[in-house]
Image (spheres, rainbow, N blue to C red):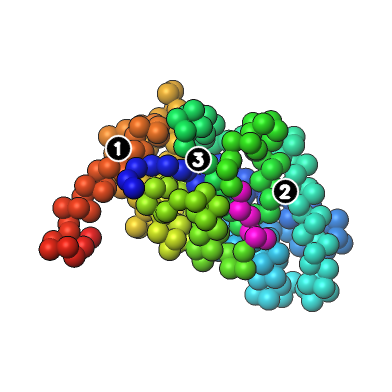
Amino acid sequence: MRGLKALIFDVDGTLAETEEVHRTAFNEAFKAAGLGWVWDQVLYRKLLAVSGGRERITHYVETYDPPGGPEALGRLQEIHALKTQRFNRLVDERNCPFRPGVERLLEEATSRGLKLAIATTTGIPNVESLIIANLDYAGLDRFDAIVGGDDVQARKPAPDIYLMALEALGLPARNCLAFEDSLNGLKAATAAGLRTVVTPSVYTAQEDFSGAFSVISHLGDPFDPYEHLGGAGDRDRMVTVNALRRWMDDDDDMRSLLTIGGRSIY
């Protein structure tokens, strides 16, 4: 079976530039919990190498040994719950608009009969808050599968989240495209066999996206074209269903040309 059947999206940094909101929510939670911790942008960029909020806090304590660290780990669930509450409040205040082209592509994909899924290391409540804030409650119904960090044991860069999303969609990886913004996300999607379109975010722009199917500044809109950074899409300036299908067909044709004697040399 050849052809594009589904789009699978990461959330943080991909659907929206949420990481600054996450950082603010972490700092507000630390203050509410009586901790004197403040994560600035430089530190947070380093901490983003660790997927998952609870895992990020644990890594911070174990690596930087902040005051009250051991006690904070004993209150990890409480602190993370405070952070989630504050994140959802900030999102509800419309501080996280979708990135250029996201809403347009979601609408087009739905109208063209493609399935949609989310595969993210963030929690489902965070995902729902972001979607509702941008698309209202009906927006949740557009997605055939939503897989969050708590649904799997191994988070990105492990492929588990994407493998679960593919299983929920009932489709093989060759008929789907993943959308990511980070190296960890690219590694996870690639390990699941997915071609991946990367739209680097504020915190991931300096990462190495070698091996991505396409690297572009964002998905593009009619009056806000994307900048092509690598891979497929150099002839376009806006991601559409037709463009994605053409990119995949060109890639499939190239792979066929690079198969000699029944053995792929791609």
Q: Is residue 239 above or below residue 190?
A: above
Which mark, residue 125?
2
Residue in the image at 73% along x and 55% along y: 26
Residue under the point 34% across and 47% down? 1
Q: Secondary structure at mark 3?
A: strand
How far is disc 3 from disc 2 in space, using C-alphas? 21 Å
x%, y% of residue 227?
37, 37
Residue 261 vs residue 140: left or right?
A: left
Q: Of marks 3 and 2, which one's residue comes earlier in the chain?
A: 3
Q: Are marks 3 and 2 in contact (CB under 8 Å)?
A: no
| Residue at x-position 67% and y-position 40% | 130
User: Counting residues from the N terminus, which is met first, the one under dot 2 or under dot 1?
Assistant: 2
Tell me, yes or no, whether the highlighted magenta stretch contains residue 147: yes
User: Is 134 rendered above or below residue 161?
Assistant: above
Give the residue pinned by disc 3: 115
**Residue holding disc 1:** 246
Q: Which residues are magenta?
A: 146-151
| Residue 237 x %, y % | 36, 32
